Image (cartoon, rainbow, N blue to C red):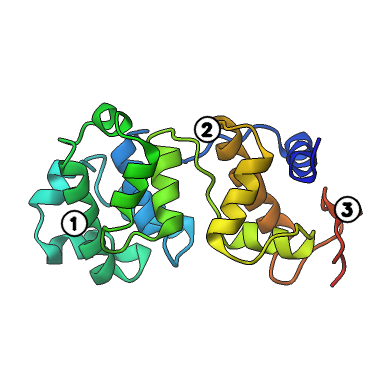
Amino acid sequence: MNELQKIYQTLLTRYGDLDWWPTVTGSPYEIIVGAVLTQNTAWHNVEKAISNFKNNLTPQIVSSMNMTELAEIIRPAGFFNQKAVYLKEITKWYAGYNFDAAAVRRDSPEELRAGLLKVKGVGKETADSILLYAFGFPTFVTDAYTVRLCERYPINVEKNYDMIKACFEEALPKSEKVYNNYHALIVINGKNHCRKKPVCNGCPLFSGCKRKNI
């Protein structure tokens, strides 16, 4: 068992299976919207914005809204004018598949990722979140918590999105469930312990961490 697999098992023992991505309807489009809205804000703000759609969050509704109306609905997520543009653009991308998740899944993840990265407002983390959580492709999501884990534990990999992503994907089984769960486990442990100012007491990774009590 390699180091990243050991970390996964340690976190899994502590926190168990985590059911991510949190949604109201479970629809791929709601996940797409959440992945865009969560940029530079806390998830509870995203939940407020999504709730403003009053259980009527569909690509057709977003497509039909004018920009001012859409921005007002998503105001709780912050940067609402900017994110309204991003939602319009990602909805146009999804329209290219007739808003059909099955049609999206017929394309390769490589093609989809390249296409998503051309959409205004979609960076690597957002693209991978959409592929993993909305459409079930095994692609590892790297975020600030993942980078912090790699720096502190440490994992011998450069602080670079693609290199960290490749490091995890090479060390783990190519599994949507594993990638989904591992990312969730890193995030919850990051929130509980591996914060900017770490709370090392009780951290399940304490014994192996090379930078404990920093």
Give the alpha-carbon distance from disc 1 to disc 3, as whole Å. 45 Å
Of 121 and 168, the residue lying toward us = 168
In the displayed structure, does residue 16 sit left or right of residue 163? right
Query: Which residue is depicted at the point 28% across and 31% down?
Result: 101
Residue 172 position (above or below residue 141): above
Tag 3 or tag 1, which sits nearer the N-term? 1
Q: Which residue is mark 2?
A: 176
Q: Which residue is mark 3?
A: 208
Tag 2 or tag 1, which sits nearer the N-term? 1
Of discs 1 and 2, which sits in the foreground?
2
Q: Amino acid at mark 3?
A: Gly
Give the alpha-carbon distance from disc 1 to disc 2, as whole Å. 28 Å
Residue 1 position (above or below residue 184): above
Residue furthest to the right in view is 207
Residue 11 position (above or below residue 33): above
Query: Which residue is depicted at the point 13% across and 42% down?
Result: 60
Task: Estimate the x, y position of residue 35 in percent, counting from the top left.
Answer: 39, 52
Q: Which residue is mark 1?
A: 88
Task: Estimate the x, y position of residue 97 in percent, counting from the top left.
Answer: 19, 37
What secondary structure is marked by label 3? helix
